[in-house]
Image: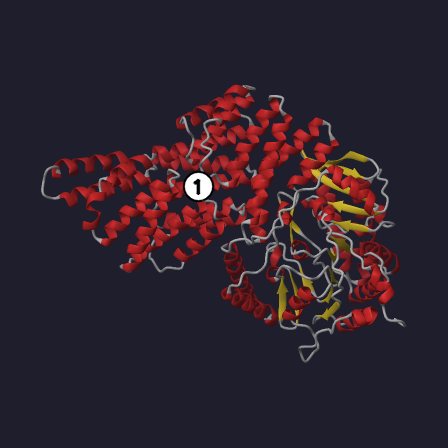
């Protein structure tokens, strides 16, 4: 093995061949078996998987005569070889056998490797929760092993989940560990995955840089197979930007297999198909795709790429029906994979893999000239995770304990010395990371949600029956496009994405600045906000003639706009929805009205007064409000219980939107914050009103997947969430909420009630209805007299 590290694999294997010649026919068969173990290890490190299996097969007759560490090494390396050849059953069996031996003999290092690599089996099999769980169990062992490989494999799982930012952080940790432990092979492998991460982010220049570094690292080590793998990533980059196609095809030819099963063989096959498509050679492109092993387990990203290529071939061959069917099947796979995990963030992250096929789908639909095809193409990919079964917190006492500690930490946070604040922030970040990690290891719900995306015909019918106008926005080829579904369906080009996002960001920033301004700056900032809102209004809604309730379906970049405040919408009820499908699937309220609960939180001077006023407005329909603390402020359990039992929940509590971790957006209660992460489906609440601060804000990911407190409520089955997109003064919120509830109890729908409230109360245009509108007109006749 020392010769391998100095002179490369050929020198190490040559030395072991000499050992075999010496012991051949001698009475030292175990020495030959150990030489086969070392040769297998060298081939594993060189990615020569078939050769590794051939060497390790020679050890089988002597397996019981080896020491426990030697048996473990044989089984782990054999399991890795099977795994890399997509022979998952055999790989799992070897690794489980190694794990049993390691546990029985207290071999911590071997246990770490076996358990960690079983996580890799789960990852390749597509079971992300199990992969994360097994890798975390391995990481918790005090095994005394280098962490570079563990970080690398963990990052692979994160990349497959679309969590690119986190994967890059883990890869950077792995790169540091590889340098510190002098592990050049691991350093090269990490550089390859840093190239993959950059490629997934769309940063082709950075991807090319990392791929080049990896290739040079492996060439220096005489690891030709791995150097070729790095160059294959470079070829994928070339194909992605349409350059050096001949070179890309030549690199891919190094994996010229009649049946493409292994990941690199499949990638090479896709590259050759891309090159053929670039040359308009459909026959060769189809021949390449025909090589793909249809029985192999394929990660989501590779599956979507293969479906995209097949759809492009079908479209170019004059078979649009097959092309659309292939793309629809890809969207179904995305939704299915999202439903298999228990993390909102992973569900949203998985949509990142769909960016390319989604863009191609929308581009082909745009080029078809059919508004019906365009609408269907944008809608099938929009907020797909909301069509999966809703997520509930797992029955995991560890998660409950971690959330409790985080809640206490946030509750006890008071202005203090900078060092104390920094320590608390660090501890809070650590707890959030641990909670998130445990949630990701949990298998997703198996509920029957599985909604189909709405079509243009269905949307048009609903527009008529609900007296609404639907306005959707999408991006295609760097441009924002608006589609309006009303009496007639129309399409308008809005402008470059960068220009539209810049204008929207300015309007959002001006609204926040005004809300937080000193009195001396109010007039100036109000003028700035009005100007920026007019600019956004002209860009997005110019030339629009809407009737009835206006339903806005925004892109990620437009999700946090104060839609109610746009001049063109001042006279309309407005609902902002993550997708037309979400708006279309308005549930019929239960016949039995479960009442109203109004809960006050601390830190807001008028929260108790506001909650009491809401209680008075609804009269006998109001459930008893919580007073479980001496201060009569509600606690986090009151919020969870109200959402699980009442039809309408009003929360007069200070809220926080967390951009970097939106599902830790929260509401402050007497015992600390209640987090979006801990809400449990199914919720009884049909309407949830969040009256304080800007918890209506949302951060999205590629795929128009919204994240945030309001988005989490909608995903759990709430029909409508009312929230503000910028901070609101306490007196404005209190006045607006009383006016709003008076209209609701009279049977007015929430979108109309918000419109009329915005006219009555200055500053109330910050509040918007999300998801759907809501009303209970039958309650108006049953309200107690003298209200």
Residue 144 shows in the view: yes
Q: Residue at x 25, y 50 (%)?
A: 71
Residue 269 placement (x, y as % from top left): 46, 28
Q: Nearer the viewer, residue 538 or 130?
A: 130
Q: In the shown orientation, is residue 708 left or right of residue 446?
A: right
In the depicted structure, whether residue 297 falls above or below residue 649: above
Identity of the residue furthest to the bottom in this view? 630
In the depicted structure, whether residue 128 falls above or below residue 397: above
Q: How many marks?
A: 1
Residue 727 placement (x, y as % from top left): 74, 60
Q: Which residue is mark 1?
A: 191
| Element type at mark 1 | helix
Q: In the shown orientation, is residue 571 left or right of residue 723?
A: right
Q: In the shown orientation, is residue 785 left or right of residue 159?
A: right
Q: In the shown orientation, is residue 259 left or right of residue 651?
A: left
Q: Nearer the viewer, residue 195 or 599?
A: 599
Residue 363 placement (x, y as % from top left): 66, 31
Answer with the quarter of the image where residue 24 lies: top left
């Amino acid at each position: 093995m020392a010769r391998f590290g100095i002179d490369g694999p050929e020198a190490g294997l040559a030395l072991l061949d000499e050992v075999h010649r010496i012991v051949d026919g001698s009475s030292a068969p175990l020495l030959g078996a150990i030489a086969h173990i070392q040769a297998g290890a060298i081939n594993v490190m060189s990615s020569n998987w078939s050769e590794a299996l051939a060497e390790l097969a020679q050890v089988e007759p002597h397996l019981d005569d080896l020491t426990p560490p030697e048996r473990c090494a044989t089984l782990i390396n054999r399991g890795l070889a099977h795994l890399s050849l997509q022979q998952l059953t055999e790989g799992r069996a070897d690794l489980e056998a190694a794990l049993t031996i390691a546990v029985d003999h207290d071999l911590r290092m071997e246990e770490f490797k076996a358990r960690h690599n079983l996580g890799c089996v789960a990852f390749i099999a597509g079971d992300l929760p199990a992969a994360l769980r097994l890798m975390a169990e391995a990481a918790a062992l005090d095994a005394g092993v280098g962490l570079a490989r563990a970080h690398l494999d963990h990052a692979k799982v994160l990349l497959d989940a679309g969590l690119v930012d986190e994967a890059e952080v883990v890869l950077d940790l792995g790169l540091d560990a590889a340098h510190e432990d002098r592990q050049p092979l691991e350093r090269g492998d990490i550089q390859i995955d840093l190239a993959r991460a950059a490629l997934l982010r769309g940063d082709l220049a950075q991807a090319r840089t990392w791929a080049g570094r990896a290739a040079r690292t492996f060439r220096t080590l005489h690891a030709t197979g791995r150097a070729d793998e790095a160059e294959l990533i470079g070829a994928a980059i070339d194909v992605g930007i349409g350059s050096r196609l001949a070179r890309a095809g030549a690199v891919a030819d190094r994996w010229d297999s009649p049946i493409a099963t292994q990941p690199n063989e499949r990638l090479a096959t896709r590259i050759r198909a891309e090159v053929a498509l670039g040359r308009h050679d459909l026959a060769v492109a189809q021949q390449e795709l025909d090589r793909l092993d249809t029985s192999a387990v394929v990660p989501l990203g590779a599956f979507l790429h293969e479906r995209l290529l097949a759809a492009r071939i079908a479209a170019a061959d004059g078979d649009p029906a097959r092309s659309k069917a292939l793309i629809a099947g890809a969207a179904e796979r995305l939704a299915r994979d999202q439903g298999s995990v228990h993390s909102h963030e992973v569900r949203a992250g998985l949509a990142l893999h769909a960016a390319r096929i989604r863009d191609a789908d929308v581009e082909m639909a745009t080029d078809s000239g059919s508004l019906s095809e365009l609408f269907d193409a944008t809608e099938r990919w929009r907020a797909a995770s909301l069509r999966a079964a809703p997520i509930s917190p797992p029955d995991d006492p560890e998660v409950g304990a971690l959330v409790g500690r985080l809640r206490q930490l946030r509750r006890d946070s008071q202005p203090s010395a900078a060092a104390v604040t920094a320590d608390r922030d660090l501890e809070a970040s650590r707890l959030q990371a641990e909670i998130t990690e445990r949630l990701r290891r949990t298998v997703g719900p198996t509920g029957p949600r599985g909604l189909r995306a709405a079509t243009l015909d269905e949307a048009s019918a609903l527009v008529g029956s609900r007296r609404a106008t639907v306005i959707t926005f999408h991006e295609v080829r760097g441009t924002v496009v608006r589609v309006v579904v009303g009496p007639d369906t129309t399409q308008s080009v809005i402008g470059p994405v960068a220009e539209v996002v810049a204008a929207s960001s300015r309007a959002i920033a001006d609204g926040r600045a005004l809300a937080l301004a000193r009195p001396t700056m109010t007039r100036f900032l109000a003028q700035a906000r009005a100007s920026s809102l007019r600019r956004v209004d002209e860009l997005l809604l110019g030339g629009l003639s809407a009737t009835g309730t206006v339903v806005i379906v925004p892109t990620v970049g437009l999700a946090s706009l104060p839609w109610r405040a746009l001049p063109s919408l001042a006279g309309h009820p407005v609902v902002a929805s993550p997708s037309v499908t979400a708006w279309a699937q308005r549930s019929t309220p239960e016949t039995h009205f479960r009442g109203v609960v109004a809960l006050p939180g601390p830190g807001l001077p008028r929260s108790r007064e506001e909650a009491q006023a809401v209680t008075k407005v609804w009269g006998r329909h109001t459930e008893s409000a919580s007073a479980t603390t001496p201060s009569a402020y509600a606690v986090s359990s009151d919020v969870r219980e109200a959402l699980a039992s009442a039809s309408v929940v009003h929360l007069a509590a200070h809220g926080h939107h967390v951009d970097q971790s939106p599902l830790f957006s929260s509401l402050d209660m007497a015992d600390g914050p209640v987090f979006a992460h801990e809400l449990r489906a199914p919720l009884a609440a049909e309407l949830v009103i969040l009256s304080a601060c800007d918890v209506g804000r949302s951060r999205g990911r590629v795929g128009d997947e919204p994240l945030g407190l309001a988005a989490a409520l909608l995903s759990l089955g709430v029909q409508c969430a009312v929230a503000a997109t910028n901070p609101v003064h306490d007196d404005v919120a209190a006045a607006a909420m009383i006016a709003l509830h008076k209209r609701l109890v009279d049977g007015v729908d929430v979108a109309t009630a918000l419109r009329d409230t915005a006219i009555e109360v200055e500053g109330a245009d910050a509040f918007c209805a999300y998801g759907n509108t809501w009303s209970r007109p039958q309650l108006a006749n049953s309200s107690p007299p003298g209200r």
